[in-house]
Amino acid sequence: MDILHAYWRMDYITSESDEKDGHRNPFSELPRMGDDRAALIVHRADHNYLVLNRYPYNPGHLLIVPYREVPDLDDLRDEERHEMMDLIVFAKKMLRNAMHPSGFNVGFNLGKASGAGIPRHLHAHIVPRWEGDANFLTVIGKTRSLPQALEETWEVLHRNKPDA
């Protein structure tokens, strides 16, 4: 029997709920770390930043996160919302250059009931997809297999950023 190791999952499983009072918001803390590689931030813009999802569905799964904590699209200022759309296009170009996916899933989980992990801080998902990337492990075994470490994905994306 082969064994798949997903050591990063334990941090996710045992992390505190976002709803608890006083719980830190990693989306607000990441830009202040001072080390974009350690924070997995691959690009900064004026109102939003692009970061690798620490709990990805696929390699290259990116999030576009506003610097300002807002829970919904309605709460974004015009310039934040417009830049977010521009960053979706930027992220797709970067992923296409670096990883050559067959397609993309792009979307938002708005509110806890939709699956938002941090419902008080809006973020967009850009997930590269390849033909056959959802194999029997995901469907039958409820296990996700990621073929690349986050740090390696950061390096590949950082080298393939399109001109802004």
Image: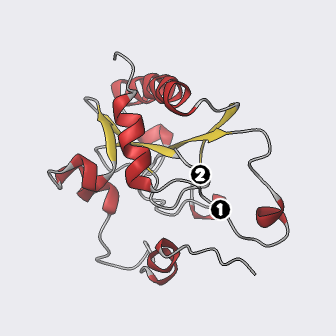
Callout 2 amino acid: Asn
- Relative side of 30 to 120, left or right: left
- Can you tell which quarter of the image residue 3 is in? bottom right
| Up-down relation of residue 80 to residue 105 (above or below) | above
Task: Name the kind of residue labelled 1 in the image.
Answer: Ser
Circle 2 sits in a helix, a strand or a loop, which is it?
loop
> Is 42 located above or below residue 58 in the figure?
above
Measuring from the top left, give residue 120's x and y in whole percent.
Answer: 42, 58
Q: Report the number of discs.
A: 2
Is residue 156 visible in this depiction of the protein? yes
Quadrant in which residue 57 is drawn: bottom right
Residue 90: image tag: none
What colouring does the structure picture have? Answer: secondary structure
Mark 2 = which residue?
109
- Residue denoted by label 1: 145
Looking at the picture, how far across and down is residue 47, in whole percent?
A: 29, 33
Q: Secondary structure at mark 1?
A: loop
State the residue lying farthest toward the top: 163
Mark before the other along the chain sequence, 1 or 2: 2
Q: Nearer the viewer, residue 47 or 152?
A: 152
Q: Position of residue 6 (x, y in %)?
A: 55, 73
Q: Residue at x 47, y 30 (%)?
A: 91
Q: Residue at x 52, y 80 (%)?
A: 13
**Are the residues at dot 1 and dot 2 in contact (C-beta closer than 8 Å)?**
no
Name the spot of residue 160 as percent of width and height, x first.
40, 27
Gap in angstroms between the C-alphas marked 1 and 2: 23 Å
User: Residue, x 67% and y 64% (percent of image)?
Assistant: 144
Q: Residues within 10 Å of mark 1 (few under 14, many from 20)?
A: some
Query: Does residue 161 appear to the left or right of 149 in the view shown?
Result: left
Q: Is residue 109 left or right of residue 138?
A: left
